[in-house]
Amino acid sequence: MPPGAATGRHVQPRPRHLALQPKALKETPNVTSSLEGRIAVVTGGASGIGEACARDLAARGAQVVVADVDEPRAQAVAFSIPRGVAGRLDVTRPDDIETVADWVEREYGPPAILVTSAGVLQPPLAPEELPIETWDHVVAVDQRGVYLSCVAFGKRMALRGGGAIVNIASVAGLRSLPLHAYAPAKAAVIGMTQALAAEWGRSGVRVNAVAPGFVMTPALRSAVDAGQRDPAALAEASAMDRLVAPEEVARACSFLASDDASAITGITLPVDAGWLVAGSWHGYGGLRPARMGGGRDGGEP
Ligand code: NAI
């Protein structure tokens, strides 16, 4: 028996006659993905996937705080979107995150949405070659930074009784890759997404993650330029034979942050052009070619 059940400390019995109807559906039958009037904070919002999230959330009506360690770039993105605001924060520093959370609430109102996109990639080195300082930094930003951001904003959302967090994980957290700091950190993000969803579910806070495949952002471009990734090989390894656009990840984030996902919490949604489902085909001769135009297995000429 789990400890909570044994002591009764966490499990509150509910009278059987109470209908277990979701309040939101009883009160608002017509849900919409408009985010009008909501305050959204996007860590890592100055570049790549975070920037695309900031733009998509703003386009749906949210007031977006672009929070990033790169302040000039955060300001440039904030100025280019409706109602955008820039804030400087380093997600490895708990004080920075608390300061930004207080400042946003004081100046603009309580955030209803948090997207945690601040992150760094890593070179695919063998463990014998990977400097422990690199390992520490990747884990500090990609794992600890996500946790600290979730706690700072999530505890405030829980006290107010509502909010939605979307963590940017990765397919690297779901499959083995030669990324000995990054991949375990992303697996931890998936784990913390589940645990925090359970933690704050009764307080109206939903916590989900997206797991992007390979997205040609400035971070991936640098890795390609450094000879650490081969975009053609990454595309070929996916079912759809292509990379993912930042906007495609952003749309999934906005969905999970919106009322359209009102009963979804604790999940990790892959946005990977089918990379996760294609890898295991390599032991069976690889993926078959497209059918259009009369491929190996037929199709329209
Ligand atoms: P990016 O480098 O374009 O953007 C990352 C942003 O995070 C930058 O603006 C950077 O200044 C900011 N940042 C870095 N360290 C920070 C810190 N300590 N505090 C605050 N901000 C910080 O990278 P990209 O590709 O957009 O990555 C965003 C997230 O998406 C990361 O978590 C990454 O792991 C994840 N991801 C990226 C994939 C890709 O193929 N590009 C695939 C799967 C996941």
Image (tube, rainbow, N blue to C red):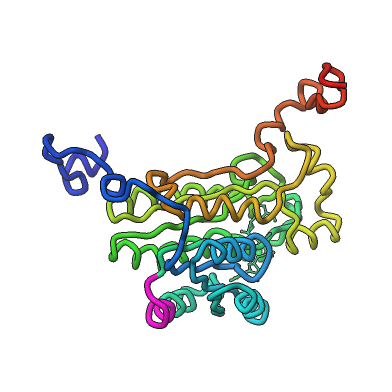
Quadrant position of ligand 1: bottom right
Left or right: 228 with respect to 12? right
State how many labels appear. Answer: 0
Q: Can residue 56 be seen in this view?
A: yes
Residue that appears at 80% across and 26% down: 286
Pinpoint residue 24: horizontal percent, then vertical percent. Answer: 30, 49
Residue beneath the point at 60% across and 67% down:
44
Q: Residue 120: name its quadrant.
A: bottom right
Residue reaching furthest front? 30
Please state if 272 lies on the left or on the right of 115 as rendered. Answer: right
Residue 262: % across, % down: 39, 48
Majority SS type along the magenta span: helix
Magenta range is 102-110
Residue 14 % position (x, y): 15, 41
* Relative depth, front residue between 84 and 141: 84
Q: In which quadrant of the rendered image does the N terminus lie?
A: top left
